[in-house]
Image (cartoon, coloured by chain):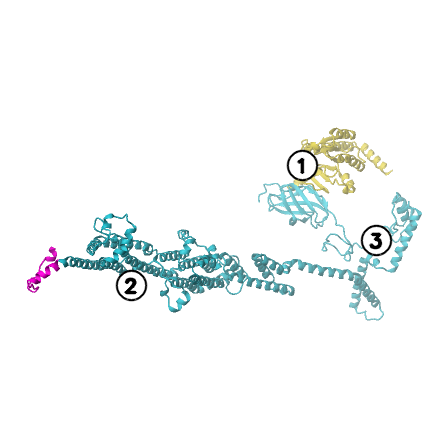
Chain colours: A yellow, B cyan
Amino acid sequence: MAASKSKNQSSLALHKVIMVGSGGVGKSALTLQFMYDEFVEDYEPTKADSYRKKVVLDGEEVQIDILDTAGQEDYAAIRDNYFRSGEGFLLVFSITEHESFTATAEFREQILRVKAEEDKIPLLVVGNKSDLEERRQVPVEEARSKAEEWGVQYVETSAKTRANVDKVFFDLMREIRAKKMSENKDKNGKKSGKNKKSFKERCCLL
Amino acid sequence: MSRARQPPLVTGISPNEGISWTKVTIRGENLGTGPTDLIGLTICGHNCLLTAEWMSASKIVCRVGQAKNDKGDIIVTTKSGGKGTSTVSFKLLKPEKIGILDQSAVWVDEMNYYDMRTDRNKGIPPLSLRPANPLGIEIDKGRFPQKDLEALFPGMSADFTSENFSAAWYLIENHSTTSFDQLKTAVVNLKKQANKKNEGSLAYVKGGLSTFFEAQDALSAIHQKLEADGTEKVEGSMTQKLENVLNRASNTADTLFQEVLGRKDKADSTRNALNVLQRFKFLFNLPLNIERNIQKGDYDVVINDYEKAKSLFGKTEVQVFKKYYAEVETRIEALRELLLDKLLETPSTLHDQKRYIRYLSDLHAPGDPAWQCIGAQHQWILQLMHNCKESYVKEQKGNSLLHSPMLDLDSDVRPSPIGHLSQTASLKRGSSFQSGRDDAWRYKAPQQVVFVEKLTKLVVSQLPNFWKLWISYVNGSLFSETAEKSGQMERSKKNARQRQNDFKKMIQEVMYSLVKLIRGALLPFSLREGESRQYGGWEMKSELSGQWLTHVIQTVRLSSESLTALEIPNDMLQIIQDLILDLRVRCIIVTLQHTAEDIKRLAEKEDWVVDNEGLTSLPSQFEQCIIHSLQSLKTVLDCKPGEASVFQQQKTQEDVCQLSIGIMQVFIDCLEQLSTKPDGDIDTAHLSVDVSSPDLFGSIHEDSSLSSEQRLLIALSNCRYLERHTFLNIAEHFEKHGFQGLEKITQVSMESLKELDQRLFEMYIEFKADPIVGSLEPGIYAGYFDWKDCLVPAELYMAN
């Protein structure tokens, strides 16, 4: 039974999500809330945590793989490696800390740099800690306009109350799935895709 | 186990990579129902169950072990769900190595630390260990493509450790933008390094240590091989040289590490010494602690510490410990002596005594402190009793010399321990007894009575403690109930059994001296010659009155009751009962004697006033007097529980009977004396009284001087009344108070009364007949009357 299951699992579609954002904004809290419905009160800086489980996305069974990364600057050097493996990103900041919001721009640039060969990267800007409204430092409008500027969705969540937690993960997975499907189409369309790629490689070399 | 549950599934790991012994949090589903349900946990194929900490069905915390695999699954196995799977994996990182001579702030596990000598597979050339930047100036990597460089310098290399090193390539690659000045300093650096190398410095050996080890191993292997072949004997052969080289190499190695190893040894020994000091701090501090705690009086703490030290170091072989333990022993010995002194110190409370005895037994004091304490207590009680007596005797003597003023000192003269005792007295005697007493009483009371009171109080207050101490001693509760005392308990119980008789003797001695002292004070005649000197010594001015005796009896009775309440065996108290009986008898006799004297004095009170029945107040006064004395004897006569009747003994019975008869006789004598007294005596004595009280019956006044004829008549009337009423009443009273030999008393007294009656009547008749006879006689003899011719008149007396 276990064997068949693992076979099943391996055959399922796998979406790789990476949590990005400054330290202490609640990346791990969001992940753990999504994965295990639990809210962790005590803060322990993450190095790099892996999570993977089966979820039902729009009636289809898929696997979500979440890489919870370190927000601290100490780990900035190893981020490149992580980002390379990611298919979609949740760019998290805390609405109670403006610095974490400004930092999102740098994170986004790093992602774009690493993923330079891809045209549209599935990404959501997430304003966490929406339950701490009284300590808000980042106005909704400011965040929303920034997201619009980048052409991405902006969602406010609360890992504590679980508000919008499922939504951000599922919306991201949908974007990843849509992107994969379009890529498959491209592949099926053969030549055009290949041409594009080879062209890109050449560009890179130059 | 049923497999109804789902198998465990690991879906999360935090963090997902790390070196060995990294703490990881594993999350997932069905990770077991409890800590005991978790029966297996492997990470990268290594079993981590030992460090696993089950938090919940979705969370386990553990440490990653020394796995062989770099990357692998996390497999959780539970009793309820079987072997599980994981969707995530852990990546094991190689720990960063620390050089053998590098300093490290953290502990490096040497088991996992592999020796460079054995790490041959790596085969690091000594030169590679040198700094990556040999020129000692900033490296500025240029953007020259490798391919171009390779094309430029075919067959060469930029690696300065390789044989076909091209300096130009290296410079282009690393220092393409470096200034000329910079390059000049680089040359200086390079020269310096080269010089260093030529000197064959220690640093050079250090740098290539692994190579040297390797070389030495190889050479010694060759040497051995050659030795085995037996070719080493050839002088000047290759092996000779090799051997020399080897020896020198090992010498160099030795000098290299000698200092380090020496320092390590020194550090180790220092650390050991510190450890010993730390671990056995307890022992080293113990003597001082004992001293302090003794001063504070925390004997419990001392005993605990001592027990601990004894069990830890009692049989130590180590010199230092022996020395300290000996010190501890001497202090404890001093403590034992101190405690023993305190224990034997008197006065002391039962509580303190018990406490000290317990301490002593805990300290394994030699001998039997409890028994010593009992002995000391015994001696002390005896001493107190004698002191008490001495002080009162002295006081009495002082009083007799100086008279009244010394009485005031009564309370001050008393020895201080007794004052102390009255406060600590654990048993209270009857309150009525105490409350009815005040200071005035003390002045009135004879010294003996006060003494007896004090003495009994003393015994009653001290004996209970003494007795309780013994009881505790017998049942073993004197010793601490805790641990390993069973042997000692047995021993002490055995002791107690053996000493039962000794203790009995002690109690008896106390009782004996108590009784003797009381006897010495109150009944000196009941003591033997030798004893009276020891226990007596009172000045017998006057006998104590019955009243005081009654009081003393009460006191002794109450103390006897108190002692009985202690459950002291009756046979020990018998002697007190005997004393009480003797006192009672004495009291009765004294009282009766006093009564007799009182009655003798009644005669003086006869006023010859006759009431309408022809009686004077004398008979009723007599009756009153007797009733009064009987009443005062009531408490003495009554038998308390456990007391024998006073009249049990034949002798006492006879004595009492005789005394009673004596009283009757005295009264009868008194009557006779009154009736036959010459006129003048009584009248003069009596008139004065009458004059002073003129408002008495007038009729009596007129004939206050009664003729002897009238007196005889009154006496006769009184006699008759006595016979008819008073004596009967008195007999009744005697009976009511349980007197024996009543018939005899009544009979004898009635007889003597009748005799008196007869005598008085004859006297009266004679008195009346005399004038008639006087007038008749000449007539009779005138006619030559002769009694011989006359017939004896018959019935003449009766008719008259």
Q: Residue at x 76, y 52 (%)?
A: B97
Q: Residues within 10 Å of mark 1 (few under 14, many from 20)?
A: many
The image shows residue A140 at horizontal and vertical percentages of 73, 29
Residue A33: mark in rendering: 1
Q: Is residue B92 left or right of residue B656?
A: right
Residue B793 magenta-drawn?
A: yes
> Mark 3 belongs to which subunit?
B
Residue type of the residue flagged with mark 1:
Gln
Q: Secondary structure at mark 2?
A: helix
Of B341 and A48, the residue lying toward us:
B341
Q: Which residue is mark 3?
A: B128
**Residue B712 - label:** none
Horizontal side of B55 relative to B411 (left or right) equals right
Horizontally, residue B313 falls left or right of residue A141, namely left
For disc 2, the marked residue is B651
Q: Nearer the viewer, residue B132 or B521?
A: B521
Q: Nearer the viewer, residue B165 or B586?
A: B586
Q: Position of residue B195 (x, y in %)?
A: 89, 57
Number of numbered labels in the structure image? 3
**Considering only vertical position in the picture, is B233 above or below B490?**
below
- The subunit carrying tag 1 is A
Q: Residue furthest right?
A: B180
Instruction: Give how far across and how far down residue B611 sits, in percent.
Output: 23, 49
Residue B671 visible in this rendered orientation of the protein: no
Image quadrant where residue B722 sits: bottom left
Discs 1 and 2 lie in a common subunit: no
- Eye-nearest disc, 1 or 3: 1
The segment highlighted magenta reads: B772-800
